[in-house]
Amino acid sequence: MSFQQNEYSHKKVSEDNNGQGANPPIASPLNDQQFNSLQQTVSELSSQQLAWVSGYFWGLAQNQPSAAAATPIAQAAAAVAAKPAGKLSIIFASQTGNAKGVAEALEQEAKAEGIAVELFDASDYKGKNLAKETHVIIVASTNGEGEAPDNAIELHEFLQSKKAPKLPNLQYAVIALGDSSYEFFCQTGKDFDTYLSKLGATAFIDRIDCDVDYEAPAAEWRKQALEQVKEALSSGNEAEVVQLPVGQADPGHSAYNKQNPYTATLLTSQKITGRDSGKDVRHVEIDLEESGLTYQPGDALGVWFDNSSELANAILAKAGLSGVESVEVDGESLSIHSALVSKYEITASNPQFVTKFAELSGSKKLQKLVEDKDKLREYAANTQVVDVLAEKKTKLSAEELVGLLRRLTP
């Protein structure tokens, strides 16, 4: 109780002094130097760490004569301040929410393992605080042609600047999300990895670069990364790992996500461009009334959809398949037709698809395109999957066909 009262008094004093150096409260047994040392220490601790330190100080006080009680308090405060508290900090750099979702899953998995963890939006994280961290995982998507997401621009620039601190004590890892149809695939994640390494930090697990179908590889990587973190934090070289409550739903989050989508009704899809316009821009309304979903301006809405059955049949005809052949998708056996309708991207092409089909088909036209990256990207951007397959008649197995295609994403 006395520690909590002192903390409250300390807050009042520091606020009255506009954050400058403060004198100890009248009832405090600490001198000015001890109080300032304690004040500096507690300002850097989380509520969980404060609670632990409070109990630790109380235990020390029970074994010390009252006249000398101030000495172990000051010593303990100095010991806490001398070394960063061992915990995992997760920072997400996200444009449309995918990286944020991976980071949130990582946070929940860390809590389930009893790892002290804190989640940060990159826009809210001060780069200089990296010097106080022991373990950091950055989950980063890439925006446009290799640019950092809007929420991570400041942190991205800071780590390149002369203001960035040296980080010899930091253990870090990076999970990068991207789209391999772009030239600068996963560039932001690669940048963060490079910047942290140059500042002296050590990667405790290799960076993983994930394409649009990132869920499975990301989940496996998270498992391996957390095993490393848990072992390090529980080895006795870092702060004690604290078991946190698990299995409780966060009231601020909806139960619906990419893996568990909400089945909604399309209310309106109205074209708002002129009759003679070459663009088809629409005003869309979707009924979310009973979903519990909330959103703010700037949020992205992902929509799962089924592909055209007719288009799937056309692709199967180009590949010489009937549609009843079986393929395995996420441990489930499906007909190739069903897989094309609900599991794979069968409209837009991409450079990887063209490159792989050029190799399978032996098409000289496509092989020549592959040799010129600029022409390859232009061709892929303007040619649909069915039209690429039409370049040269080629018999494909069901496994070869799905091996060419990318997974469907919202």
Image (cartoon, rainbow, N blue to C red):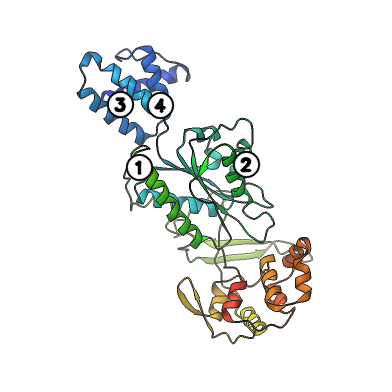
Quarter holding residue 24: top left
Q: Earlier in the sequence, mark 4 or mark 3?
A: 3
In x, y percent, where is residue 343? Answer: 54, 72
Check disc 2 and report the residue beneath it.
153
Residue 213 vertical placement versus 22 (above, below): below
State how far apart marks 2 and 4 are (Cα): 30 Å
Q: Quadrant of residue 347?
A: bottom right
**Please, what is the three-letter code of the amino acid marked with disc 4?**
Ala
Marks 2 and 1, the one that precedes in the sequence: 2
User: Residue 81's mark?
Assistant: 4
Asked if residue 71 can be seen in this view, the reply is yes
Discs 2, 3 touching: Cβ within 8 Å: no
Of pointers 1 and 4, the one earlier in the residue sequence: 4
Residue 400 location in percent, x, y? 60, 77
Q: Is residue 146 above or below residue 77?
A: below
- Which circle's residue, 2 or 4, is located before the other in the chain? 4
Q: Secondary structure at mark 4?
A: helix
How far, Cα to Cα, is label 2 from label 1?
35 Å
Foreground residue, 253 or 108?
108
Q: Which residue is mark 3?
A: 4
